[in-house]
Image (tube, grey):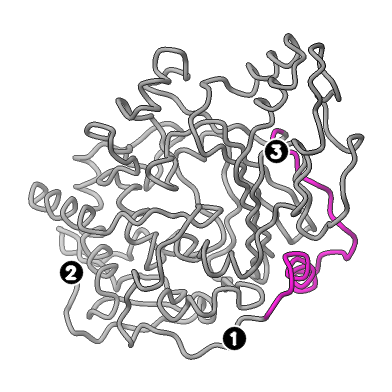
């Protein structure tokens, strides 16, 4: 039975489309036409997205909805965050393994669950702030190309030694920034996307003031020993860097990946950081109807199952949804297969990209359950859940509109089809 289940599990996982999360917290999206849902899964017509004249306008609206103070919030320095390490066979990046990694000859140990082609790129940072006692701000800064195996410590040493503008640029190099504000008690959430090259000073999206050289963090110097200038064109983004709300809504399509709540995690991120976990009884509400149009083909739905029949004949609650919402899009199609080690988040040209360890359910930091024990304990749960992910309206499946009805019993599937 276990061997048959393993084949079924891999078939289901591999048949789920490996759609790259490319919103700009997860960075980039498919076209709306790439997503299809049954009409019965579509939510009722929503009020249209509010029209915001600028990111600043949207940020101020978000602040009023989340109860944030009106004065501008302080900027972010990406490098004040925690650097997310990339290793190959347990070893830090170095002159030997980095060319192999960047060429796709080898994969990394804990790939990010973002864009497959960028899953092993290094020099990313994560930071969290309490904007108020009830509102969290989380930022991820990413370098989206292979440049150097050096980590923050090594790059800082180069700045101290070389005292060159080139070393400063290398130290602060960041390509994209994703920012989330979430009210932990109401579930109201705002998404922001920043593009730029200098990660030392990322203004809050509610702050349009132009920084001065004095505002920049250390290390800094205006001119190096060779006469090169650390000019404003390097560290100041005249467009303020923040993409418009319309761009975030139409192109980033954050809710495709953030389908069950504001924050995602993975073994990549968990090496240094555990995101906040809003209570799953709290609704997940996108401020300003930012993705209202998208919700017609990406409804904010989580999936669960009726009680699961164990091999011993005992009825058990679905184990995955005891702790988590399982969103019907990215979470069902990719996070679940990644979490149970049957689908790799890494893309070709990596030869035989490594499967991640079985990450869920957790049994201890750095300790993972092996495949035989996982199959013995949880095969019946996964079979039922993956079936409902593929056909939420099937009998023995349950759907919830997480934006409105997280506390209710959910909508039972009435067919066609039956799970498991």
Badge 2 vs badge 1, beta-carbon distance below 8 Å: no
Above or below: residue 23 compared with residue 176:
below
Left or right of 348 on screen, residue 28:
right
Residue drawn where x is 89% and y is 35% of the image: 213
Left or right of 37 on screen, residue 225:
right
Left or right of 318 on screen, residue 296:
right
Crowding around mark 2 (Cα neighbors within 10 Å: few <14, some 14 to 19, many 20+) is some
Provide residue 301's location: percent of width, then percent of height.
43, 74
User: Based on the displayed image, in which of its 4 quarters is residue 222 positioned?
Assistant: top right
Which mark is nearer the camera, 2 or 3? 3
Which mark is nearer the camera, 2 or 1? 1
The kind of secondary structure element at disc 1 is: loop
Given residues 34 and 279, the one toward you in this image is: 34
Residue drawn where x is 40% and y is 27% of the image: 102
Given residues 129 and 80, the one toward you in this image is: 80
Left or right of 326 on screen, residue 69:
right
Provide the residue span drawn in magenta: 51-79
Above or below: residue 197 compared with residue 184:
above
Residue 76 falls inside the magenta stretch = yes
Which residue lies under the disc numbered 1?
48
Which residue lies under the disc numbered 3?
199
* Disc number for residue 420: 2
* Disc number for residue 143: none
Residue 78 falls inside the magenta stretch = yes
Could you give the CA–CA distance between mark 2 and mark 1, rounded to whole angstroms?
Answer: 38 Å
């Amino acid at each position: 039975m276990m061997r048959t289940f393993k084949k079924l599990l891999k078939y289901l996982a591999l048949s789920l489309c490996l759609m790259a999360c490319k919103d700009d917290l997860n960075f980039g999206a498919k076209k709306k036409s790439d997503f299809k849902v049954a009409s019965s899964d579509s939510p009722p017509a929503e009020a249209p997205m509010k029209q915001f004249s600028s990111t600043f306008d949207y940020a101020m609206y978000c602040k009023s909805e989340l109860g944030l103070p009106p004065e501008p919030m302080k900027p972010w320095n990406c490098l004040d965050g925690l650097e997310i390490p990339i290793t190959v066979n347990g070893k830090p990046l170095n002159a030997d393994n980095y060319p192999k990694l960047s060429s796709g000859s080898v994969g990394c140990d804990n790939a990010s669950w973002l864009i497959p082609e960028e899953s092993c790129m290094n020099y990313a940072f994560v930071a969290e702030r309490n904007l108020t006692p009830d509102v969290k701000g989380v930022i991820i800064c990413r370098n989206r190309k292979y440049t150097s195996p050096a980590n923050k410590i090594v790059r800082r040493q180069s700045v101290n030694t070389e005292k060159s503008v080139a070393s400063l640029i290398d130290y602060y190099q960041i390509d994209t920034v994703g920012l989330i504000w979430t009210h932990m008690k109401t579930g109201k959430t705002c998404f922001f996307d920043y593009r730029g090259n200098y990660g030392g000073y990322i203004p809050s999206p509610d702050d349009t003031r132009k920084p001065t050289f004095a505002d920049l963090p250390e290390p800094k110097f205006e001119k190096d020993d060779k006469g090169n200038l650390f000019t404003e064109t390097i560290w100041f983004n005249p467009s303020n860097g923040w993409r418009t709300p319309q761009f975030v809504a139409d192109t980033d399509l954050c809710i495709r990946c953030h389908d069950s709540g504001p924050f995602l995690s993975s073994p990549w991120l968990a090496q240094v950081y555990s995101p906040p976990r809003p209570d799953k009884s709290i609704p997940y509400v996108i401020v300003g109807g930012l993705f209202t149009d998208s919700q017609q083909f990406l409804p904010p739905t989580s999936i669960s199952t009726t009680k699961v029949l164990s091999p011993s004949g005992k009825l058990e609650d679905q184990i995955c949804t005891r702790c988590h919402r399982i969103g019907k899009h990215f979470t069902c199609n990719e996070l679940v297969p990644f979490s149970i080690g049957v689908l790799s988040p890494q893309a070709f040209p990596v030869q035989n990209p490594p499967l991640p360890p079985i990450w869920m359910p957790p049994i201890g930091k750095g300790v993972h359950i092996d495949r035989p024990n996982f199959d013995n304990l949880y095969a019946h749960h996964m079979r039922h859940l993956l079936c409902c992910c593929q056909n939420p309206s099937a009998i023995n499946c349950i759907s919830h509109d997480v934006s409105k009805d997280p506390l209710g019993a959910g909508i039972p599937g009435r067919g066609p089809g039956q799970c498991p």
